[in-house]
Every structure is written in structure tokens, then in C-alpha cells.
Image (spheres, helix red, strand yellow):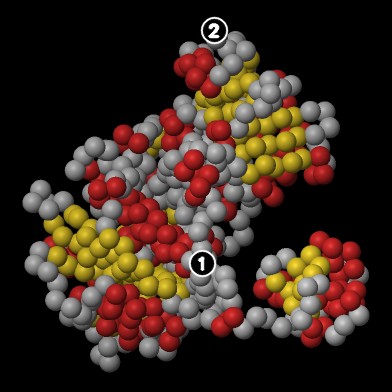
Amino acid sequence: MRTAGAALREMFISAAASTWGVPVSRCKAAHGAVTLTDSTAKLTYGQLAPLAATLPVPTNPALTPDAQLTLIGQSVPRTDVPAKVNGSAQFGIDVRLPGMLYAAVVHSPKIGGTVVGTPSVPPGALGVVSLGNAVAVVAGSTWAAFQAAKGLKVKWSVPASSADIDTASIDATAQSLMASGTALSAEKVGDVGVGLGAARTTIDATYSLPYLAHACMEPLNCTALVTSNSCEVWAPTQGQGLNVGTIQGITGLAASQITIHTTMLGGGLGRKFEQDFIAQAVSISKAMGKPVKLTWSREQDFGNDRYRPMTLARVRAGLDSSGQVSAFWVRTVSPSISAQRGPLVGVDHSAVEGSVTLPYSFINRQTDWVQHPSTVPVGYWRSVGHSINAFVVESALDELALATGQDPYQLRRRLLAASPRELAVLDAAATLGGWNLPVPAGRARGIAFTSSFGSLSAQVVEVSKTSAGKLKVNSVAVAIDCGKAINPGIVAQQMQGGVAHGLSAALWGQVPFSAGRSTVTNFNRYRVLKMAEMPVVKVQIINSGAALGGIGEPGVPPVAPAVANAWARLTGTRIRTLPMFPGDGRMGEG
């Protein structure tokens, strides 16, 4: 982007120099215009654009030196905040169109069910539209649609296999596959069998993670207006390009006849990348012949998510007599996100990311993956596989350190000795979190390092135990290297948000299933971090100059293992199954 901007700047300067008949050295581009030195002459980019567009594009334009940058690297005010404060920001559920109707949706009460015939229109409704695995009720307001949906009488065809959608059954299948399932190799360096045989000390640990909901603050919604020759959609969507293909499949329109208006997201976390709510709104509008706003109830949202996949992972690792990690072997069992979207060839990368291509100097390493056949719908949850596998890898490293009487931080330092960029991030987090300082009485610290989405992040978490025996996260120190922080304020905010999101999932997050359906239908059984529970989060940004990495997701993966590692050091209890406190999963509990 900087190169493109620099090329445009040179083109505008060349166009101005040509217009004035002066050398380009006398022209300066800034603030949307080119000015002539020692003169009041000025031409805006708009005035210069017709001529500039005819000039050749420079292939190697000069970039502004870092010392002269005025925006990059500065914390500038967020442009979205004023609108969110004064109420003018438009989220998806704020959309209003002339003559608009309102729709609610009722999905099959069990996963995999389909509608048998279109039910009759209930009192208070204007229409009913069958959507295959759901029925939409259309009314004059969202409230009226919700109320009418409660009385809807629908006949469903439910496959017998839905009875297998039960947490106990899913877990039992995972255990069986862990023992004897056919695995695909995601990564193999050296021979882990030989490495384990040469180890002085070994660990063999199995970790379990549950399905998770996205739990976006704004439930799914979409407004659609379908006519014979056009379609407009207003939605909090993360998948605009995919939306076009989805709409074409329903309407038969050309891409040029489709317009997507992206509203404020209201929380996406990967859920609003999906196409189900877009397809439903478009289908309803097409059937009704009018603009329609579809809003999912919170219960429909929780019960019909594209959940983060459950995972069972076993780690066998060993340290040899020289103190080197002679083997690190991960075997993972999980459903495949990719396989639910089309034919899968080989390993699902999202299932193993965070357990392959690790920067640690393991002499022998191997990651195997076994696909779980569960039909629970799964999707991309903030940081995807990294949020799963970071817990596995970083917990196992701590277990290996403690089994050999080593400091977990120092073990990681040795394993990253040949990776200076990674080591700098780890050291920064340790310093920021006071790792080498005395720990206050009744507290302990845990550490974790992850590499995800082109960025490096390490966290030091300090925890304590309350008088009621509950875990309290007191502080989190975050070091982040995303190459170069374009807006450091946003980077720090994303890290803080990632910590809050990761803590909610690590401590309480889970979606159990019974008899083909989710047993979580609202926030009363899906606890999230409350304001009073938010720890102090300190962030140190490292500008290494590496290629730009992501920021929205790298703050999440280190949280769960850092907390689990701290809790183990504080209590001597190693938690290998998330959430850490499943019995506290109701909102309102301490």
C-alpha cells in the first residue's frame, strides 16, 4: 500500500510539473494537493488526476523515510468512536427501508433436520417461507415476527444420526480415534520414536477442548431487497465476496446487479463470515417481493452456530541428557471445518495450525491429525486452530519444564535461541510481567508464546486464588510483534480485547450437546468475562521491521495456556481440559 501511494505521489508531481512547465524538484505533494515551491501555485489531486492517469506508473517509487512519517506508527483517534457514542453508527439491526417487512427464523430443533412442507401462517404474521432447514416468519415488526415464530407449527424430518450428536458420544468417539484412528501426517521432521527412546525424561499428556459459540453481541441479521433485476443487501458481514456468489445462486442475477452494504459488525469473531443468514434474508425477500429484515433471536443464534471445533490432543515429548527436546509428538483428533465446506484432500490446515512449523528447536517433531466424523456445524472462531493448539503445545512445554525442574521461561528461551525475533518477544513479555521478580504471596505467574497470522505474541499472566477457591486473573503482560504497528493504539486495544475473549473461553466457555441439539441457548448458560473481572493488561509493542502481521487474532491464543500454567504453579493442579471451571458457567455466579 505504501508503494502504491508513493507511485501515485510521483505521478501527481509529474503531472503538476508538466502543467507548470517546471522541474519535478520544485513540486511537493501533501494533503491532497501539489504545491510549487517559492510560489502560491497549487493543484489538487482531483485537478491533476486526468493527466496523472495517462502517465506511466513508477516501478520503484521512493518511500517516505520512517523518520518523516506522520501517520504510520502514531496512535490516532478512531474514526468510529464518535458515531458509536452519539448513536449515529449504523449496525445491521439499525437498517430501515421504506415498506420493509420483518422476519424471524425457526431452525430445526435438532441438527440435520429439514422442513416437511410449509406450515400455515400463524396469527399476527404476514407470511411464512420454508428455508430447507428452517422456516421464516414474516410480520410487521421484529417483535411481532418473534412472537408469531413461537406459535409456529412445523413438521420436521430429523435423521436418525442426530441422536449421535451428544457430548458424551462425541467424546467417546474422539477417545477411540485417538487410540486407533487413521492419522494423516501434517508435519514430520526427524524420527520422534527415536527421540523418545533417547529421552531422559518424557511426558505423555492428553488435552481436551470443547465446542465454543461465537456469542456475538449483535445476533445475526440481514436486510435484503430483491427485485427482478437487482439485489441489495445490508448486513454486518465479514464475507462480502462470498455474499455475491451466495446471492447469485439464489437469484440468478449477475454480479454487477448485486450490491452489498456493509454495516457496523456488532461483533463478528468469524461467525459473520458465514453465509446462512445472508442466504435466508435474500430468499425471504425474493419470496415476499419486498425488502425484508431478518433478525435471529439469541436462542436461534446460540443453537445454530458454526461452533469452534472440539479437539482431543495427545502430546508425547522428551528431554535428552543434554537438556534438548529430543522429541515433540502431537496427535490431534477434531472435526474438519474445510470438509464441511467441500471435498477435503489431505490435512485440514486449520485443525493443526499452531502445532506445526513451530519456532522451537525440537530435534524431532511430528504432528498427526485424525478427522472426527461429528456433524456438529463448525466454523472459524477468532484465531481458529491457534486458539486450540496453543493451549496444547504451551501447556505441554510447561509440563516438560516442571517435570525436569526447569523454569518454564528459561526452557523456552533455550528453545528459541536460534530465533532472535521470537526470543525478543518472549523476553519482552517476561520483563513486562515481572517474571524474574518476587511473586506476591498467594500468587503465581504463567507464561506462553505463540506465532500466528504473521505476528508473534507472548503473555505473562499473574493469578491468585480467592477465599472461595476461585481463580482470579490479576494482570496480563502482553508483548506483540506485528512487524510494524501502523496505529499502536489499535494494536494495544486488540490485545486487550483478545485477552478478554480468551479468558472467557478458557475459564468457562463450552457448548455441550444432547440428543441432537445444543444445551446452551442464551448467555445465562454461556458466561463471559464481566467488567469487574477484567485484569490489568499491559501491552508492549515491538516494531521489528518484519512483514506486517495480523492483530485481530494473535492476542487470543496465549491466554488459555498462560492461565493454566500459572494455576498449576499456584495450586499444583494441572488442568488439561477446558474450560477450567465448567461448573461456573452461568452468568451471575462468582
Q: What residue is rendered at 38% in x and 88% in y?
A: 417
Counting residues from the N terminus, which is met first, the one under dot 2 or under dot 1?
2
Q: In this view, does 70 lie above or below 496?
A: below
Q: Tell me where residue 72 appears, x and y as whole percent.
A: 56, 72
178 or 18, nearer to the observer: 18
Q: What residue is rendered at 85% in x and 74% in y?
A: 16
Q: What residue type is labelled 2?
A: Pro
Q: What residue is rendered at 23% in x and 75% in y?
A: 434
* In the image: residue 506, left or right of residue 299: left
Corner quadrant of residue 295: top right
* In the image: residue 367, left or right of residue 444: right
* In the image: residue 2, left or right of residue 198: right
Q: Is mark 1 on a helix, strand or loop?
A: loop
105 or 348, nearer to the observer: 105
Q: Tell me where residue 227 appears, x and y as whole percent.
A: 79, 28
* In the image: residue 544, left or right of residue 479: right
486 or 300, nearer to the observer: 486
499 or 299, nearer to the observer: 499
Q: What residue type is labelled 1?
A: Asn
User: If the image is split into quadrants, where does the N terminus sit?
Assistant: bottom right
User: Can residue 132 be seen?
Assistant: no
User: Can residue 472 be seen?
Assistant: yes
Corner quadrant of residue 256: top right
Q: What residue is rendered at 48% in x and 78% in y?
A: 543
Q: Total label count?
A: 2
Q: Is residue 352 above or below residue 583?
A: below
According to the picture, the residue beneath numbered tag 2 turns out to be: 123
According to the picture, the residue beneath numbered tag 1 turns out to be: 487
Q: Tell me where residue 323 appears, x and y as whole percent.
A: 27, 88
- The disc placed on residue 417 is none
Q: In this view, does 212 lie above or below 104?
A: below
Cα–Cα gap, marks 2 and 1: 53 Å
